[in-house]
């Protein structure tokens, strides 16, 4: 526990949230999201950003409780009792554990072992996450009831208990007790890509750094959320250099709220002065020539813009342009007629219709391009070997002549003229259609002119309507919907152009006169006064929002201060210091020794200590003599992984300096018989040095443990339909030796005798059948254990031939005793049906005692003979 004590000493004077994090890591190993949220709250409370109402862990008391379990005071667990509302455990259930040596708690799946282990994990020391203990689903009111359990322990001659209630325990003394299971096994040796481990005390430092990072992540998320609520107060800022604007431009977390109150105090007198200033400015503006000239220039610009638009419309619709369009349309009509005549002349004898049409011309040009590209010859080709570019057949003389005529048609002057006039007409159509006669966007300008010149808007509307009708007529001419002969070109005019011209001239004359006057200085002084009053009024109306913004910025600054306290540099320094102190050659040597004791011989591995991301790791690597860079993690079997994990667990305990209890929960789950036996042997060896508790459902593993220590204490767990964790007085029957089975049968014989005196004959008979069934199984165990000297075992995977050397002493009388007693048992045990007239009476109590005594005498006789 010295590493943890050093960490607690180091935390003195550090932020409170760091001290609380250390306490919680010691208690829980892995902190939940709720823990991180609470630690974040504590961190913020230290900067005055919030208040934390919860109770804090007293690290001094934690350190004192750890001292109680130091070298001279090993901690042993002797009882788990007073359980309430824990999973499906029977309320007030309990299991007793031997103070010394090896105790095995055996039970089938679902018997409640995991619930007891979960309780122990809440108060003892284990790697990885601590399991959640659910409330009893089979109790209707469980959700409203507390969860509770007590663990009695012994240190030296003192016996006391730890109370666990609703995820909290009243003492940390049982942190000296270590738990190992398949879930925590990987926590000892798993790194991201290699096999490595660090002692549990140093793991606290690593987790502390991780906690700081997670708290910082929460703080940065909160900053992001708060920044999204930032007040946009730019609408209150202008370029005036008064005190209010200076305050707003420099607004920050350090801005003074009292100053804000003073500069935003907008009174009734200020309101009166603001209105008077506005009136004075309005009056000065009417007198101020510069302002008036500026306004007049804007008006002139708007009016000239409208005038230019009128002129542009008239330019596009000039009589010269329209007459030209009319001539082009007429010429196009004449050319089309000439083309039609030429077409009839050229193609009158052709078999296909529409030759000479536009689609045909497209086809012709495409064929021409293809031919010239592929043959590099002029089209059409008149050589003797010429072929049609479409059907690829040889051309006859008649076909060649026809090709010449078609090309001549395409190349004719009429066709060229049609193409040219078509392009010109399309351009004219685009120009006419581009004339925009919608003036809705300058409605304000039209209203201004209407006020100056009587009935301007109506005159505008009439003239634009006339122009619109004329545009439609021209477009009909271009589209062929109107005959050129019936179309009359008009000389358009917009008399409003002259009206605008005279109005502009008048305004320009006014500007010349205004240039001689100036009230600018008076206007600037009044403008400054007005700006200050408006800034003051706006700030007054938004004062509370500005206050909230200052407070928001102060809160964000406080969060950044919190983030600075989460810096892990000093934690990295602590990690390096403790690593140098505790990851020593002793630890490495102990690890190597543990591998040998566990029978790890698969591959040769070496150990080294390296630093990664500020953390010290004890790495395991393939010995260089293999000449391979293979990753050790990838080549080890599951059993070898478990062996290394267990070696790290035990070697870490070897430097802890105490002999407190260790607890194994199904340590050989999913492993084969070879590894089971090796691990069983090592666990039994360790039980000679300290208290060892094993929870298991594996009967074979239990037999392995008994093979190395036939005096281990076994306690069984069983269950009812809705209750688990019920302690059975007797160990599992399958795991019992002949001697222990005889002991249990003697106890059952007493119950049988009581049934004979108090129950019906039928009930007594049924109980006798059960007794004789177990007596037969005891004889079978005797044959395996005593007669065959355990050379063959039903739960074993090997035959031990050396044990057969003592089997040669059996006599004919021995065989007859076995046969007679087995036959006697078979007569009465359940499962043997008999004809009705052959049903015998149940044996008397005296007969039953004699039958049991026969097994005990036979066993002792063989043992004595072989000694």
Image (spheres, rainbow, N blue to C red):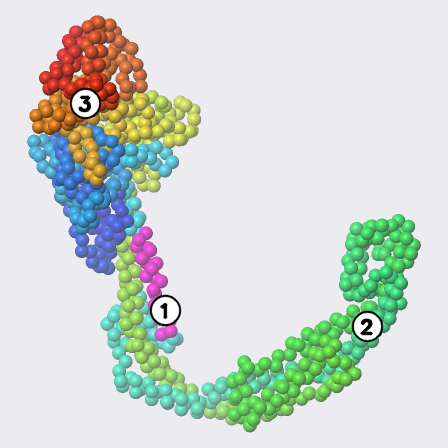
Which residue is rendered at x = 18% and y = 49% of the image?
Answer: 141
Label 1 with label 3: CB-CB less than 8 Å: no
Tell me the CA gap for discs 2 and 1.
70 Å
Q: Dot 3, how many residues are within 10 Å of its Cα: few (below 14), some (14-19), or many (20+)?
A: many
**Horizontal relation, residue 826 to residue 857: left or right:** right
Res 618 quadrant in image? top left
Residue at the spot x=78%, y=59% of the render? 363
x 84%, y 53%: residue = 388
When the figure is inspected, residue 113 is found, relative to residue 32, above or below; the finding is above
Query: In terms of secondary structure, where does tag 3 sit?
Result: helix
Nearer to us: label 2 or label 3: 3
Specify which label sits upstream in the sequence, 2 or 1.
1
Residue 102 makes an appearance in the image? no
Q: Quadrant of residue 243?
A: bottom left
Residue 67 against residue 43 in the figure, above or below? above
Give the structural element (helix, strand or loop) at label 2.
helix
The N terminus is located in which quarter?
top left
The verdict on residue 363 being magenta is: no
Q: Which residue is mark 3?
A: 769
- Crowding around mark 2 (Cα neighbors within 10 Å: few <14, some 14 to 19, many 20+) is some
- Disc 2 vs disc 1: which is toward the camera? 2
Q: Is residue 628 left or right of residue 483?
A: left
Q: Does residue 262 sit above or below 740 in this rendering?
A: below
Residue 444: x and y in percent read 51, 85
Q: Position of residue 111 (x, y in %)?
A: 22, 34
Residue placed under numbered mark 2 in the picture: 336
What residue is disc 1 on?
232
Q: Which residues are magenta?
A: 217-236
Q: Residue at 15% across / 19% down in the picture?
A: 841
Q: Is residue 234 magenta?
A: yes
């Amino acid at each position: 526990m010295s590493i943890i004590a050093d960490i607690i000493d180091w935390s003195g004077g550090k932020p409170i949230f760091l001290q609380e994090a250390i306490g919680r890591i010691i208690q829980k190993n892995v902190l939940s999201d709720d823990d991180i949220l609470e630690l974040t709250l504590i961190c913020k409370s230290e900067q005055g950003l919030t208040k934390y109402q919860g109770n804090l862990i007293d690290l001094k008391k934690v350190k004192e409780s750890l001292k109680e379990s130091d070298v001279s005071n090993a901690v042993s667990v002797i009882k788990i009792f007073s359980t309430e509302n824990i999973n499906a455990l029977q309320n007030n259930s309990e299991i007793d554990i031997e103070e010394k040596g090896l105790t095995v708690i055996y039970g089938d799946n679902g018997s409640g072992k995991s619930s007891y282990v979960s309780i122990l994990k809440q108060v003892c020391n284990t790697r990885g996450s601590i399991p959640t203990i659910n409330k009893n689903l089979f109790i209707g009111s469980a959700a409203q009831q507390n969860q509770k359990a007590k663990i009695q322990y012994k240190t030296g001659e003192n016996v006391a208990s730890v109370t666990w209630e609703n995820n909290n325990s009243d003492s940390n003394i049982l942190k000296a007790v270590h738990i190992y299971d398949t879930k925590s096994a990987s926590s000892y040796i798993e790194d991201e890509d290699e096999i490595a481990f660090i002692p549990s005390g140093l793991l606290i430092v690593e987790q502390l750094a991780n906690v700081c990072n997670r708290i910082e992540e929460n703080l940065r998320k909160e900053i992001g959320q708060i920044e999204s609520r930032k007040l946009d107060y730019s609408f209150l800022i202008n370029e005036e250099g008064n005190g209010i604007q200076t305050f707003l431009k420099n607004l920050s977390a350090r801005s003074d709220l009292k100053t804000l109150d003073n500069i935003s105090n907008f009174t009734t007198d200020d309101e009166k002065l603001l209105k008077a200033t506005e009136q004075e400015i309005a009056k000065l503006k009417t007198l101020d020539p510069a302002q008036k000239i500026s306004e007049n220039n804007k008006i002139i610009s708007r009016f000239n813009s409208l005038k230019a638009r009128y002129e542009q419309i008239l330019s596009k619709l000039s009589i010269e342009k329209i007459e030209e369009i009319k001539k082009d349309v007429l010429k196009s009509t004449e050319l089309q007629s000439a083309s039609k005549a030429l077409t009839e002349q050229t193609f009158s004898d052709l078999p296909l219709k529409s030759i000479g049409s536009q689609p045909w011309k497209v086809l012709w040009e495409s064929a021409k391009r293809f031919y010239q590209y592929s043959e590099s010859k002029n089209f059409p080709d008149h050589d003797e070997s010429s072929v049609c570019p479409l059907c690829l057949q040889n051309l006859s003389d008649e076909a060649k002549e026809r090709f010449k005529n078609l090309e001549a048609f395409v190349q004719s002057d009429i066709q060229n003229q049609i193409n040219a006039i078509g392009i010109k007409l399309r351009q004219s159509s685009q120009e006419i259609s581009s004339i925009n006669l919608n003036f809705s966007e300058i409605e304000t300008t039209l209203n201004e002119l209407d006020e100056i010149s009587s009935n301007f808007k109506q005159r505008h509307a009439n003239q634009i309507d006339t122009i619109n009708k004329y545009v439609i007529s021209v477009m009909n001419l271009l589209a062929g919907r109107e005959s050129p002969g019936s179309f009359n070109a008009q000389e358009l005019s917009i008399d409003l152009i002259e009206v605008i011209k005279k109005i502009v001239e008048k305004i320009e004359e006014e500007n010349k006169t205004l240039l001689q006057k100036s009230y600018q200085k008076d206007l600037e002084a009044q403008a400054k006064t007005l700006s200050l009053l408006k800034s003051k009024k706006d700030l007054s109306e938004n004062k509370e929002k500005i206050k909230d913004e200052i407070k928001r910025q102060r809160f964000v600054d406080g969060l950044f201060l919190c983030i600075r306290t989460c810096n892990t540099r000093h934690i990295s320094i602590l990690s390096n210091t403790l690593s140098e102190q505790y990851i020593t050659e002793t630890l490495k040597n102990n690890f190597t020794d543990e591998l040998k004791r566990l029978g790890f011989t698969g591959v040769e591995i070496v150990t080294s200590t390296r630093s990664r991301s500020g953390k010290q790791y004890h790495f395991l690597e393939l010995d260089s003599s293999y000449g391979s860079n293979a990753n050790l993690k990838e080549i080890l079997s599951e059993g070898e992984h478990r062996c290394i994990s267990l070696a790290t667990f035990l070697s870490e305990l070897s430097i802890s300096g105490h002999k407190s209890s260790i607890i194994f929960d199904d340590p050989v789950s999913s492993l084969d018989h070879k590894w089971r036996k090796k691990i069983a042997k090592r666990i039994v060896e360790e039980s000679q040095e300290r208290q060892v508790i094993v929870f298991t459902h594996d009967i074979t593993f239990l037999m392995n443990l008994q093979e190395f220590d036939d005096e281990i204490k076994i306690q069984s767990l069983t269950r009812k339909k809705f209750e688990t964790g019920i302690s059975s007085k007797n160990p599992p029957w399958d795991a019992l030796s002949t001697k222990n089975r005889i002991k249990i049968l003697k106890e059952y014989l007493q119950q049988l005798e009581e049934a004979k005196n108090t129950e019906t004959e039928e009930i007594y008979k049924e109980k006798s059948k059960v007794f004789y069934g177990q007596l037969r199984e005891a004889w079978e165990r005797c044959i395996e254990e005593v007669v065959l000297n355990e050379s063959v075992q039903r739960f074993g995977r090997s035959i031990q031939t050396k044990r057969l050397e003592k089997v040669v002493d059996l006599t004919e009388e021995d065989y007859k005793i076995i046969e007679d007693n087995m036959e006697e048992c078979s007569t009465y045990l359940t499962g043997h049906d008999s004809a009705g007239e052959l049903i015998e009476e149940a044996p008397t109590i005296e007969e039953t005692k004699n039958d049991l005594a026969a097994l005990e005498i036979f066993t002792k006789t063989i043992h004595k003979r072989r000694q």
